Structure formats: C-alpha cells, structure tokens
Image (cartoon, rainbow, N blue to C red):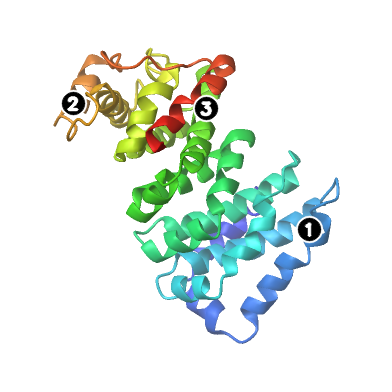
Amino acid sequence: MPFPSYARKRGMFKDLAPMLWYSFGTMAALLQEVVLVYPTLSSPTLSANASSRVCNALGLLQTVAAHPVTRTPLLAARIPLYLYPFLNTTSKAKSYEYLRLASLNVIDALVKVDDTEAVNFLVTSQVIPLCLRIMETDSELPKLVATSIVKRIMLDEFGLQYICATADRFFQAAMALATMVNALAEQPSARLLKHVVRCYLRLTDNPRARAALQICLPKPLKDGAFDNCLQDDPATRCCLQQLLDNLGAPAGGGAPRPGAGGSAAAGGGARHPGPGPAARGSRGGGSSSQAGPSRAPWM
C-alpha cells in the first residue's frame, strides 16, 4: 500500500476521530480530496500520487467510521456514499485497487461493531452488489475485505433477511460465493476461505436459502478439496462441517446438531453431507443449473 507509515501514525492519537469531525473545515477538506479525483475514474490511468492522496484521506475517514462517537454522525451525513464511485471502478491497475481497498476499509470499520443502523444504511444504499462484484473479480486483499463486509452484514438479522428476501438477491450472493469457491479450489487461501464458509453457514439460518443451498452448494466444499488448506484452521473446519450438517438435514429440519463441528475437527476434514440433493459444483455447468433450482424456494 502507498501509505503504511501514515496508517501507523494514525493509531498514535486516541481521540483523532472526534478532532477530525468537530474541527472546523476538516471533513470538508477530506471530502474535497475525495471528489477531486472523480473525473479521473473514467480515464485509463490514475497517477500513483493522486491515488495516494485520496487513500490518505480515506484512511482518516476510516478512523472517523471506527470511532463510537463519530460513527453515527458520519452515517447521518451519508458520507460513505462518496466512496461508492471508487468501489464501482474495475481497472486492475494498482492505483485503482488501492482506492477500492481503502474505501472498503472505511465500510468495514462501520460494520465491525454490532450496529444495525450501519447495516441498514449500507444495505439500503446498495453496497452489497458493489462488494459482490469485487468478491468475484478483484485481487485477494479487496476480496478479503469485501467478503468480510458481506459476512458482517449477513450476521445482522436485517442484513440476512434483506439478502434472502428475493430469489435475485440470494442468487447474486450465491453466485459470487460460488465463483470464489471455484477460484479457491485452484488457488487456495485459508484466510479468504474462512469468510466464504462463514457466509454460507450464516445463509443456512434462513430456511429458503438453506433449501436452495442443498441444491447449489459448490462441489469443492463437499468433496474435501479444502482439507489441506484448512489443516491449520480447526475453527473453519468446524464451520464447514456445521454447514454440511445443516444442509444434510431433512427439509424443514430443526436446529443444527450440537457439537457437529467438533467431530470434523477431530477427523481432520469435512465429511460429505450424506443424504440430500446433489450439489452441482463445476464452474461451467453449475452456473446454468443453479439458476432454476436456486429460485425454487422463493416460488
């Protein structure tokens, strides 16, 4: 990143966020740094210097977003909306990737605490589709933060209900997660897989989503493809086993079996879920077959 030393200095000031928010003209100056780069977002190149300047401003906004005193007024002023143009960029150049990552860090700071107000704002302002696209197409670090944001939104009851309210919303999330699973099967990343598995596990708390996942859960999650990747991560192995147990239960089954995850950890890998609909796991044939079955529970 172009601003590591700056990020370290930020943590030296305990009350930096209230100072930034309540000092005259400071937030206006930070927003000016953000909007001044808008005209360059549609150009093929963004200079490293311009990207670094905006990332520094976004780093300060992240501090404001993370502080309990300034988080609420930041949301009330709808300042996160100023970051969405950066999340909407698709260039693979590092200068654009840094902008997306720094913007995602601001959003992540808002959802790191259990704050339904923040989740409601982000969900209704359509941050989820932006994160899903980054999860599918970006490099590992932006994917990691975007998936963490979606996971935290799902952990909130309003966020889970929003995603599972319609077939289209669920299908968009499921397809993004499936794309990541298939990519991770080729290039494993334990830290990224951890968030993906927890997203799937949380989706099984919704009956319609659970029924759809019994049909369209990607095959690599079921056939032990990630056993080596998760060898040193017993917590995620337990979550994966719990996911498979939830989906292997009969339709309309009750709560997950207590301690199901522990047996997976002891066994060293995830079991096949056993009886139940076969999941379609191939990246090529899976996408077309998922489109119909995944919508069935909403009909």
Amino acid at the residue labelled 1:
Ala
Where residue 202 appears, as percent x and y from the top left, is 33, 39
CA–CA distance between discs 1 and 2?
A: 51 Å
Answer with left or right where residue 195 lies relative to residue 50.
left
Where 149 sits versus 136, above or below? below
* Frontmost residue, 3 versus 240: 240
Where residue 299 appears, as percent x and y from the top left, is 41, 36
* Residue 224 appears in the picture as rendered: yes
Looking at this view, name the residue that lies furthest to the left.
258
Chain-order first, disc 1 or disc 2: 1
Rendered residue at 53%/45% (across/down): 146
Amino acid at the residue labelled 3:
Ala
Residue 254, picture quadrant: top left
Disc sitting over residue 291 in the figure: 3
Chain-order first, disc 3 or disc 1: 1
Disc sitting over residue 50 in the figure: 1
- Packing grade of label 3 (10 A; few <14, some 14-19, many >=20) is some
Disc sitting over residue 17 in the figure: none
Q: Circle 3 — which element?
A: helix
Where residue 3 appears, as percent x and y from the top left, is 65, 54
CA–CA distance between discs 2 and 3?
A: 30 Å
Amino acid at the residue labelled 2:
Ala
